[in-house]
Each structure stands twice: as C-alpha cells, then as structure tokens.
Image (cartoon, rainbow, N blue to C red):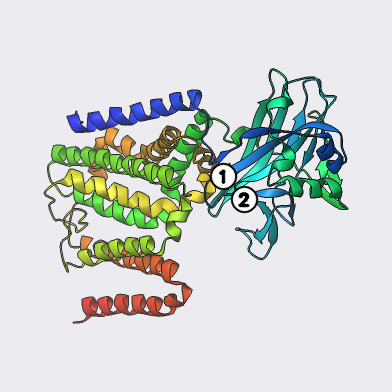
Amino acid sequence: MYLTKPITTLFYTLILALACGVAHAQIKPSVLPMKTPVEAFKLTAESSSALGIEGAAILTISIDMEPDWYAYANIPSEMGKPTKLVATAADGTALTVFYPKGKEKPDTFNPSVIINAYKSGTRLFILVPADVTAYPIAMRLDLLLCHPTKCIPVRRDLTFGEKGIDTSGFPLAEDQPWWPGLVELAKKGTGSSKSASSTATQESKDGLVIWNFTPTYLQPGLEVTSLVSAILMGLLAGLILNIMPCVLPVVSLKLSAMLNTGGSDNQIDREHAFREHNIFFALGIVSFFLVLAIVLGSSGQAWGALFQNQWLVLGLAGVIMALALSLFGLFHLPVVDLKFGTGHANPRTQAFFTGSLTTLLATPCSGPFLGGVLGWALVQGPLVITAVFTSIGVGMAIPYLLLALNPGLARFLPKSGPWIEYVEKSIAFFLIATAFYLVTIALGGESLRILAPLWTLLFGGWLWVRTRP
C-alpha cells in the first residue's frame, strides 16, 4: 500500500465531516436571515370604531430581515410570489389579516419591472375579534425572501396565546406609530381572511386577481428534499462534471500530468508514481470543494456568483497563462509545473494542486447538474453545506480513485520521446486560448476582437519557427 499516514488522516477527516453533516441535518433546522417576532396590542372601543370592526386585540408579525434582503408584498405587482399570512383560532375561525402595500423598487432580477417589496421591519396585522375564545391562535407565514444573489422560499408556523389572551396588560394599539397606517388599510378594505383548509387558487383584491400557483415537478423523485438525496445527486453531478465541455482545459492539464508519470522505464516505479499521482490528484479535488464550501457558507453567495467577480476571473486567467508560458520554457513554476520530462521535487504537492486547479476550471459547467443541489444546500447549516460539497468532490474524484486502485493501467501510458514536445505545445496553446476566453468574460466581448487575432498570430508564428529550414 502506498497510502501514507497523512493521506489516511485526511481521508478519515473527510469521512467524519460527511457524517457530522448528516447528524447536523437531522438535529438542527435551517438558519434563515429573518426573524418574525409576534406582538399583541389592545383595542379600545374608540379604536375598534376607527377600524370599523369590533375587535379585542391586534397581533402584529414583524418581518425583520438582515441587510439587503427583502420580500415581495402581498400584491407584488407584475412578478414575484405574494406574501401570505393565514391566521386561525383553535376552533378553525379565520381571522382577518391586513397587509401593507410595500415599498416600490426595481426588481433585483429584472430591473425593468417595478415591484412592491417588504423591507425589514414591515408589520403584518391580525385582527382578533372580541368573540374569539378558542386559543391558541395559529399563524402560517408564506413568503419569498430575496437577496441580490438568490431567493429563498420561506414558510413559518407561529402560535400565540397558548393560555388565552388577557388584553389588560397589552399596550394600546392607537398609541403605536403604525396605527394611522392600519386605519388607512381598514378603510380601503385591504384585509383578507381565509381558513387554513382553503384551497382556492385565486382571490380578488381591489379588482386585481392574484393567482397562487403550486409547483408540479416533472420528476418528483429527482427533487432534492433531504440531505441523503442531496449527497446522491452531488455524487452523480460530480461524476458527470468529468465529461462536460468546460473540462477540456482540465483534460489538457490531466494529460500533461499523466504523461509525466509514465516516463520511467521501471514498471514498478511507473505503477507507484501512477497510483500516488491519482490519489493526491483526487485529494486536491475534494479539498477544493471543502474550501469552496467554507467560502460560500460564510459569504452567503451562490457558486456562480464567484465568477462574476472581475478580479477573480482575471486572476484565474493569469494563473492559466503562467502555466501555458511555462510549457514554452520561459520560466519554471515552483508548484504546478506541467513540462514533460522534468522531475518534481515533490510530485505529491504537484498532483494535489493540479487537481485543485482542474476543479476550479470545471466550475462554470456545474450549473445544469448542481442547480437543485446547491439551491437546497446553500440555505442549510455550514456542516450540511460541507457534507454536500464533499459528496460533489468525491463524485468528481471517483475516476481517479479507480485509477489508483488499478495502477496496472500505467503500462498503457506512452513513454517520452521527441513527439511529446508537440503534445506539450498543443496543450500550451489550448491553455492560452482558455486564458483569453476568461479575459473576455472579465472585460467584455469587445476584447475578443484583439485576443482572437493575437492567439492566431502566436500559433502561426510558432508553426513558422518550427517548420522553417
């Protein structure tokens, strides 16, 4: 066995992280960037008269959100999921709910559309009639919580008055700063009541029809609803990433590294190098996903949002360009040097960082397969995010782990020869094209008019130098 002690320790650490993620998902609920405190206020005879409805108390639910978050209003305008609040007494009596209009703002995902949004601190009002005696009052809040980078559907169940409601100790509703707004809502008739068992598909308010759509999945069995399904989908998606178009640069790096392991004439040495390279290459993949889980879990950003950072994309383009230029012998890179026939002082480190780099290059192709998995995982706790991302990394590393288990495949690798220089330079030009493509993502498509002819001139100049007498 060539599995050294450090590799074994890291392997068991990854397994422990995966197991902790499973336990965490079972005992800790999702953490949302929102709190919904419930408060009660007393209605006097005069205040009930102002509302036009005889009531005993007003319950308020405050939607307190973290900075930059918002929710669509009950009437969101042209797009968005309406915020709904259903309140019922213990005997099933439906209570009236008053919704504020919300603040007008351009929709984050379609700025051409003006929506009504609930900002942090918005209150929803529930009228508790004087004749209600069945407690507690059950409330269900259903809304779409949105941020400039993502949206989270939220459904929260709340209760109030388990031992009944004694209004004698409540502050007066008419003394609160929101009271004039509530009176205005009552005069406009913007309150609504609906029993918890209602299944109506639409309701009318002020002549507007609001449709409440319930999603129907084409393949419900493939929907991510638990940690187990997320891990299984992550393993499959990670495995599929190995054959996606975005991995063409990855293939170049992998081919370079694999051919470097096949230069020895001794079969035992070749198999040893082959096995060791694939083990550390796989560890590089999994480690990258662990780091990515920590970054996304702490920043709250989506995976694709990382590639919207101009400096990150330019930095990645610079790394790939450095790899390409090193293949022309302009300089030697200290860690990831892909030149054929050059011995590495630490081949394990070289394989590890090559695996991490290839995973970074494959990231843009993750969307079609990881959208549902990431959408579910990124709203969970940090250990769940770590478990899911680890499964994606293990899925992508499966082919290399299988190669490590069968080092006899090393005998099919070709030995070094004069022909390998042309393979090396082909990989270099492919990496240059990849770097230029990333520059166009960061700086815009106009730069392609300069970079595409430049790549052609570089390739043509090299061919001219190599083929002249």
Residue at 78% over, 24% down: 89
Asked whether 282 or 251 is in front, the reply is 282
Numbered mark located on residue 65 in the image: 1
Q: Residue furthest top?
A: 163
Residue located 33% across and 80% down the image: 457
Q: Residues within 10 Å of mark 2 (few under 14, many from 20)?
A: many
Eyeballing the image, is 64 above or below 464? Answer: above
Q: Are marks 2 and 1 in contact (CB under 8 Å)?
A: yes
Q: Is residue 85 left or right of residue 5?
A: right
Quadrant hosting residue 383: top left
Q: Is residue 12 or residue 427 the one in the foreground? A: 12
Residue linked to disc 2: 119
Task: Please state if 33 lies on the left or on the right of 165 as rendered.
Answer: left
In the figure, is residue 106 to the left or right of 147?
right
As shown in the figure, which amino acid type bears the numbered disc 2?
Answer: Lys
From what the image shows, is residue 460 above or below residue 259?
Answer: below
Relative image position of residue 286 (x, y in whole percent): 34, 40
Q: Residue 237's spot in the image, x, y percent?
A: 48, 41
The secondary structure type at the circle numbered 2 is: loop
Q: Residue furthest bottom?
A: 469
In the structure shown, which secondary structural element does the residue marked by tag 1 occupy?
strand
Placement of 259 over or under 16, stated as above or below:
below
Quarter of the image containing the C terminus?
A: bottom left
Report the residue at 77% width, 21% height from top: 90
- The CA distance from mark 2 to mark 1 is 8 Å
Q: Amino acid at mark 1?
A: Met
The reply to whether residue 205 is visible in this rendering is: no
Q: Quadrant of residue 3?
A: top left
